[in-house]
Image (cartoon, coloured by chain):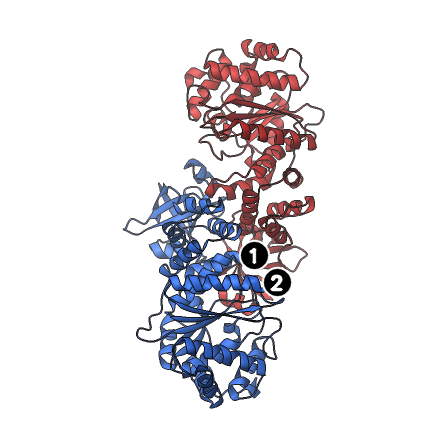
Chain colours: A red, B blue
Amino acid sequence: MKLKAKILNIATKGPYIAILNKVTAAKLNIEPLDRIKIRDGSKKELVVAVDFSYGKKEIAENEIGLFLDVSDILGIRDNELVNASIIPKPVSLEFIKKKLDGHELSKDEMDKIIKDIVNNELTEIESTYFVSGCYIHKLSLDEAAYLTEAILNNGGRLNFSGKTVVDKHSVGGLPANRTTMVITPIIAAAGFYMPKTSTRSITSPAGTSDVMEVLAPVSHSKEKIMDIVKKTNACMVWGGTMDLASADDKLIKLERPLNLDPEGIMLASILAKKASAGASHVIIDIPVGPEAKIKEIKKAKDLAKKFIVLGRRLNMNIKVLLTDGSQPVGNGVGPALEARDVLSVLEGHGPVDLRDKSLYMASMILEMAGVPNSYNKAKNILDSGLALHKMKDIIKAQGGNPKVSSSDI
Amino acid sequence: MKLKAKILNIATKGPYIAILNKVTAAKLNIEPLDRIKIRDGSKKELVVAVDFSYGKKEIAENEIGLFLDVSDILGIRDNELVNASIIPKPVSLEFIKKKLDGHELSKDEMDKIIKDIVNNELTEIESTYFVSGCYIHKLSLDEAAYLTEAILNNGGRLNFSGKTVVDKHSVGGLPANRTTMVITPIIAAAGFYMPKTSTRSITSPAGTSDVMEVLAPVSHSKEKIMDIVKKTNACMVWGGTMDLASADDKLIKLERPLNLDPEGIMLASILAKKASAGASHVIIDIPVGPEAKIKEIKKAKDLAKKFIVLGRRLNMNIKVLLTDGSQPVGNGVGPALEARDVLSVLEGHGPVDLRDKSLYMASMILEMAGVPNSYNKAKNILDSGLALHKMKDIIKAQGGNPKVSSSDI
């Protein structure tokens, strides 16, 4: 049928939605969340889910309301007549139902679900059923591997060919765990690449990005980030602008309202992000304690095993450290105080626990990357001021003031 | 904070949403689906969930995009400054999480979830987790009773005081099961009230409303429906405009993408709708067969028991009939052919199976309502033409042509 386009002044970057008047929908026998394919006369076409409008004021009969996301892609203008036809629902909905019913998904099924989520072809209601299924029925190790590969294959990648890329990740939940910002300049000063991208914090009040933002901007284009890393061997940026693992960002949005963090999705999310940045050696820090996300040593060991097995399937060398998560590391909690702790450790004073934990982890990473006598190497880089110097290079490359010192904050 | 309102020309009758620019949200430390309370300076206020806009073109920094649903309620105009403050998430999200984790919900918890769904205070993502929990973990009989009461207490009611209201319901899935349209005029002619409201069809191609629509309009205001029933003892209308059991309509929308129909929600949905119309005697028809929704007799008996126990808790007298669902009843499938079948049975000819099944069920209803010798009574009403006459009264009251006969269709 032909419908008159009404461009709605919103872009959500979310699933593609078109709005039909209830009367139009009834005439066409369309129910909410049915799919229609829109063509603008040229060759471009797009599948959108239908939602209803009820008044006549906005979307009248025989009109179709289009968000800017849709009208921009198709180049449709207000009042233009567009061709729309009803099409079947995406096959990925069957796979989501399968998971909700407790069955295991195959590699292809997982890939199709993630592809459709990334391409905005599933509504948030539909993707929420996927999260529900993964949460209640858990993912098998196979499924977690398929999900990792699916996120990886349907997202962007950083390519630092020829360089050894290492990384670390802390399984969240522990406030003020700012070792990353001490470790990164040590590793970068030792000659390895360590491009740190973080998502928004899911379960803790401030993430590494928030703390780094006290010292330098953290939102950069993918090109700029590549540039920063090539110049300094490292970066500490917010990953949201990079389209790395973009399925992941969409799933996290759905998990937030109930603070869900299904283990299988968490494993896949972390490993896909590391793999998309080309990391070959990764340290995973699992703080264990009553305040941390993982409260029991048994659970932590089980999780560690899964990280290692999954890493092997992705050709990634993974070492897991179970650390004491019984209290915050450093003196302060909150972006400014945590940034001050980090700088003071790099300057040669500062909280001893943050220094010790960072040195320990840095030496593990160096050891994995083949550096002999790695603890002394890390200690020398920190004590000689090389790490501080490297930190200032990174701050400068990201557009901050490299003359900053801990006493300024 | 103060934000400048941008009224978005959409009303969805769905959950209340406000759109913030990503930059504004980051400054205020708001994540997608966080809640803000909007005040317009007067005493009215409304809680909305936040979604993000990404470009500057539509919702710029320090602006807030409002759907017509929200701006109409608060009387906010374009460019007006509105006060917005961040508030905690609704407590019903904890209860939804509890169900998702497999725990049983209390009466108060169930009521709060449904109240928030009806009041548009939960986003569709959040309500979808509720449906997921009910689907995977099933509802206990207690929970199904609480859900029925919650839907009932948070929806509209019809009040026919002093009259005995009876009803019938067929558990869907069987095409062309048009007994309702033969039974209703028989019962109405016998002097009982039978206000039939139907939802849109969930699992079968055409519902009673669609078939009745061939003979008369089925969308009427609540007042008009009360009027039709008072005039004729019955109606056969679409229930969507009535705000009876409105939680139910919202849940059905969420179930459709995966064709879910969780038993507990189905039981509550049917019984709440009957109770909201004041029905004291209800026949439930469960067709059993390979083509029907219920395929095994054991499953049907189990379901029957639940209907009866739940009905007792709601002071409702329920009788369940397990009928042969192995083939369609009547000659035709599709609104027009099914309407013709119905009229021809009322005229004294027509498919024998439809006549027999309808008479049998009508007599059961009359028996429940205390009519002696109920089968002969029903048969007399049909054979004497009283039922046809009553059908024409109903068609006329709903605005159709009472002179219609089966040969016209």
Q: Where is residue B29 in the image (x, y as percent from the top left)?
A: 43, 36
Residue A55 seen from this side: no
Q: Name the residue under label 1.
A: B257
- Looking at this view, is A327 or A65 the one in front? A327
Residue B351's place in the image compared with B70, above or below, is below
**Which of the numbered marks, if any, corresponds to residue A86?**
2
Label 1 resides on the chain identified as B
In this view, the residue farthest toward the left is: B43
Task: Find the distance from the CA under tag 1 to the CA under tag 2.
Answer: 15 Å
Position of B382 with respect to A94 (left or right) is left
- Percent across and percent down for residue A131 are 55, 45
- Observer-nearest of B60 and A53: A53
Q: Residues within 10 Å of mark 1 (few under 14, many from 20)?
A: many
Residue neighbourhood size for the residue with mark 2, other residues' Cα within 10 Å, grouped as few (<14), some (14–19), many (≥20): some
Q: Nearer the viewer, mark 1 or mark 2?
A: 1
Amino acid under label 2?
Ile
Q: Is residue B168 visible?
A: yes
